[in-house]
C-alpha cells in the first residue's frame, strides 16, 4: 500500500497543501498565492502574510484532500516546512500540522524549505543518482548544495549579498515592472537582445561556489540612469542582458561545483528555476559536462507543498519524526536540519 503524506508549506507568501503518494506521485497540489495582496506593497509584508495563511490554510488542506480523493484517515504522516522563512508564517503551518498529527495520531515530520525545493527534483525523477549538486535559486536563497545521500545535504555555496530572485525583483522594480519581478523580466526579455547592454558578472574567487548579485543590480541602476538621461533606453534589452548575466554566473558556479565534487547530476530548484532562459542555459552547459540535469516543471519550482510532502516521505522512511514540541526556526540552516534530525520515539 502506498504511503500518503500531507505536505504543508507556509514559509513565505504561498499557502500550500498537497498530498503525495510514496514521495513521487502528486495526488493534489493546492497553492493559494497571496501575490495580489502583496503586490500593492511591492513585496511581501510579513504581518499580512501570516494573517493570510491563517485564513487560507484550512481551505487549502481540505481542497488538497478532496482533490486527491482521500480522507484524513488515509494519511500516514504530515510534513511541514519549519524553516527557513518568515517566523509568523511558518508558525501557522507548523501549528496546523501539529494539531492534525495529535488528532490523527500520526507522525509529524519537519522539513527544511531548501531541502523541500531540492526534493521537487526527486519528485519528478526519483532515480536521480547520488551524489548530485543542487542549485536552489529563490527570492531568499541562492544556495549550491551537495547531496551525498538522502540525509546528507550540505551547503557548499551561497550568495554573499542579494539572492538571485531578490535581484530579479529589485531590477524589475527599477524597470517599472512590479512584483514579483522574475516572471515580468522573463516576459520582457523575450523581446530584447541579451548582448545589448554590457553588464558585469561577479565570478568571485575561482575556488568558491559563492555568488554575488548586488554589483549587477547597481550596474543596471547606473546604466538606466545614464541611458534615460541620454534618451536611448530599451527596457527589453536591459531585461534580456540582466537575465543573461544572472544565468551565466549561476550556470558556471553550479557546473563547477558539480565537477569539483564528482557529482553525477545537477538539480535545479526554487522559484527562479521557473526561468526558461536559465533552464536552457543550464541544460546546454551541463550536458557538455556529461551531467544529468533534473529540472522540475515551474509549478514545482515555485513554493508548493508537494515538494514538502516528497521530502517528508524520505524522512518518513528513515523514521525521522519530530516531537510535537518542534519549533519554527526563521534562520534554519541545512546543517541543523540534518544534525538534530532524529527524534525516534
Ligand atoms: O521559491 P519561491 O517561490 O519563493 C521563495 O522561497 O523565495 O521564489 C520566488 C522568487 C521571486 O524572487 C521571483 O521573482 C522568482 O522566484 N521567480 C522568477 C521566475 N518566477 C519566479 N525569477 C526569474 N524568472 C522566473 N520565471
Ligand atoms: Zn522557496
Image (cartoon, helix red, strand yellow):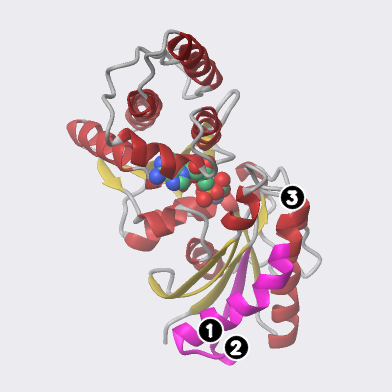
Residue positioned 59% across, 75% down in the render = 60
Residue 233, horizontal then vertical, whole percent: 39, 18
- Find out if the beta carbon at label 2 lies less than 8 Å from the nearest ligand 2 atom: no
Q: Secondary structure at mark 3?
A: helix
Q: Quadrant of residue 26?
A: bottom left
**Residue that badge 1 annotates:** 65
| Circles 2, 1 touching at the beta carbon (< 8 Å) | yes
Q: Nearer the viewer, mark 1 or mark 3?
A: 3
Up the image or down, 136 lies above or below 344; here it is above
In this rendering, position of residue 96 left or right of residue 228: right
Q: Does 6 appear above or below 194?
A: below
From where the camera sits, is residue 280 visible? yes
Question: Circle 2 sits on which residue?
Answer: 72
Give whichever of discs 2 and 3 has the lower sequence position: 3
**Front tag of 2 and 1:** 1
Residue 71 drawn in magenta: yes
Report the front residue among 239 and 334. Answer: 239
In the rendered structure, which segment of residues is drawn in magenta?
52-80
Q: Quadrant of the N terminus?
A: bottom left
Residue receiving disc 3:
46
Along the line of sight, which residue is nearer the eye, 345 or 9? 9
Q: Secondary structure at mark 2?
A: helix
Viewer-proximal residue among 341 and 102: 102
Above or below, comparing residue 31 to residue 200 in the picture: below
**Disc 1 secondary structure class:** helix
Residue 159, quarter of picture: top right
Give 167 or 35, whichever is nearer the viewer.
35
User: Does 322 appear in magenta?
Assistant: no
The quadrant holding residue 300 is bottom left
* Main SS class of the magenta portion in the image: helix
Amino acid at each position: 500500500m502506498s504511503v500518503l503524506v500531507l505536505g504543508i508549506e507556509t514559509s513565505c507568501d504561498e499557502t500550500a497543501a498537497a498530498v503525495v503518494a510514496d514521495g513521487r506521485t502528486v495526488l493534489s497540489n493546492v497553492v493559494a498565492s497571496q501575490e495580489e495582496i502583496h503586490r500593492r506593497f511591492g513585496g511581501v509584508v510579513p504581518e499580512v502574510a501570516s494573517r493570510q495563511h491563517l485564513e487560507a490554510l484550512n481551505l487549502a488542506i481540505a481542497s488538497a484532500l478532496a482533490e486527491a480523493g482521500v480522507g484524513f484517515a488515509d494519511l500516514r504522516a504530515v510534513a511541514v516546512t519549519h524553516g527557513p522563512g518568515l517566523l509568523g508564517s511558518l508558525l501557522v503551518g507548523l501549528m496546523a500540522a501539529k494539531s492534525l498529527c495529535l488528532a490523527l495520531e500520526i507522525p509529524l515530520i519537519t522539513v527544511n524549505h531548501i531541502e523541500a525545493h531540492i526534493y521537487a527534483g526527486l519528485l519528478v525523477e526519483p532515480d536521480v543518482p547520488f551524489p548530485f549538486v543542487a542549485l536552489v535559486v529563490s527570492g531568499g536563497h541562492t544556495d549550491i548544495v551537495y547531496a551525498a545521500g538522502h540525509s546528507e545535504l550540505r551547503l557548499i555555496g551561497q550568495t554573499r549579498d542579494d539572492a538571485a530572485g531578490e535581484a530579479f525583483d529589485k531590477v524589475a522594480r527599477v524597470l517599472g515592472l512590479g512584483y514579483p519581478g522574475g516572471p515580468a523580466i522573463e516576459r520582457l526579455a523575450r523581446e530584447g537582445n541579451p548582448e545589448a547592454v554590457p553588464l558585469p558578472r561577479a565570478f568571485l574567487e575561482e575556488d568558491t561556489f559563492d555568488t554575488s548579485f548586488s554589483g549587477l543590480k547597481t550596474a543596471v541602476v547606473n546604466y538606466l540612469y545614464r541611458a534615460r538621461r541620454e534618451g536611448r533606453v530599451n527596457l527589453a534589452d536591459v531585461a534580456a542582458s540582466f537575465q543573461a548575466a544572472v544565468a551565466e554566473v549561476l550556470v558556471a558556479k553550479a557546473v563547477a561545483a558539480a565537477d569539483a565534487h564528482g557529482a553525477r547530476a545537477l538539480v535545479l530548484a526554487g522559484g527562479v528555476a521557473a526561468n526558461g532562459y536559465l533552464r536552457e542555459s543550464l541544460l546546454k552547459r551541463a550536458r557538455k559536462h556529461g551531467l544529468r540535469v533534473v529540472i522540475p516543471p515551474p509549478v514545482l519550482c515555485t513554493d508548493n507543498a508537494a515538494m514538502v510532502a516528497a521530502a517528508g516521505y524520505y524522512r518518513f522512511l528513515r523514521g525521522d519524526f519530530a516531537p510535537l514540541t518542534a519549533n519554527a526556526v526563521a534562520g534554519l540552516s541545512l546543517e541543523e536540519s540534518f544534525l538534530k534530525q532524529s527524534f525516534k520515539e
